[in-house]
Image (cartoon, grey):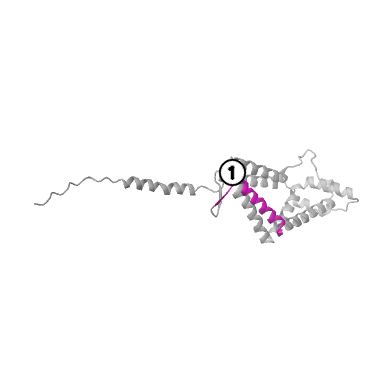
């Protein structure tokens, strides 16, 4: 007589919960990997501030035809008169003069692509690796985690190497000297008698506030991001 077959017991399906748990892992990883490497709102605010400052500064420039008026050119009688002319003309043509210097710097960098790439790479490193990188996201390069102090030290060292040990520093200094020489020559030979100078005008308005405003905005945004 054949032995009776054992009863069939119901079998539960626990792997379903395991599959559900494992299915959520890629989504968490995806969310973490999709986070931007920098604080996007702070970086956008920085770019918008620079753009608005440049636009407001350029809107206060004097007419270029007035700057290039050949009838207003005359030789100064002394060095003191030339210095006085430079000071008055700079107060009146401030935005135009700074625009000329900026154009000379830009032309010098464009004519030397290697120096331009080095300078852009250095600027991008400061922006993306330090200023606008959230403090809760450590910098990891080739599997090694760098602290904020180590990152700052490396960036300072790279800045010294790029500016002083390559052609970038000499290029910037030479272009700046050429621009200042052109501005001083025009200011010394431009007669300022026909200019309507406003003595109550602040010393740093318009395009001059670009450097200070951009620096303050960058510092504020960086501090807000890294807190």
**Percent from the top left, x then y, of residue 154?**
64, 51
State the residue in front, 161 or 127.
161
Asked which quadrant contains residue 225, the reply is: top right
Give the crowd class for mark 1: few <14, some 14-19, many >=20 residues within 10 Å. many
Magenta segment boundaries in residue numbering: 144-167
Judged from the image, the secondary structure of the residue bearing numbered disc 1 is helix
Q: Residue at x 38, y 45 (%)?
A: 21
Please tell me whether residue 149 belongs to the stretch shown in magenta. yes
**Residue 103 shown left or right of residue 221 in the figure:** right
Which part of the image, by quadrant, shows the C terminus? top right
Asked which quadrant contains residue 158, the reply is: bottom right
Q: Residue at x 36, y 46 (%)?
A: 20
**Percent from the top left, x then y, of residue 28?**
44, 46
State the residue in front, 120 or 82.
120
Magenta stretch: dominant secondary structure: helix
**Residue 141 shown left or right of residue 175 in the figure:** left
**Percent from the top left, x then y, of residue 119?**
66, 55
Please tell me whether residue 119 belongs to the stretch shown in magenta. no
Residue at the disc numbered 1? 42
State the residue in front, 45 or 159.
159
């Amino acid at each position: 007589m054949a032995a009776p077959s054992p009863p069939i017991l119901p079998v539960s399906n626990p792997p379903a919960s395991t599959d559900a748990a494992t299915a959520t892992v890629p989504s968490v990883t995806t969310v973490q990997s999709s986070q931007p490497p920098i604080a996007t709102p702070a970086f956008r605010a920085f770019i918008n501030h620079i753009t608005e400052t440049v636009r407001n500064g350029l809107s206060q420039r004097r007419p270029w035809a007035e700057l290039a008026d050949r009838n207003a050119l005359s030789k100064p009688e002394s060095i003191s008169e030339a210095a006085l002319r430079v000071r008055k003309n700079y107060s009146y043509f401030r935005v135009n003069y700074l625009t000329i210097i900026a154009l000379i710097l830009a032309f010098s960098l464009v004519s030397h692509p290697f120096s331009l790439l080095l300078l852009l790479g250095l600027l991008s490193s400061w922006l993306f690796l330090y200023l606008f990188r959230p403090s809760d996201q450590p910098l990891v390069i080739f599997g090694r985690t760098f602290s904020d102090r180590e990152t700052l030290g490396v960036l300072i060292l790279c800045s010294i190497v790029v500016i002083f040990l390559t052609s970038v520093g000499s290029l910037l200094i030479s272009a700046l000297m050429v621009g200042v020489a052109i501005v001083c020559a025009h200011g010394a030979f431009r007669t300022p008698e026909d200019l309507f100078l406003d003595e109550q005008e602040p010393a740093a308005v318009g395009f001059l506030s670009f450097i200070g405003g951009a620096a303050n905005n960058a510092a504020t945004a960086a501090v807000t991001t890294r807190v």
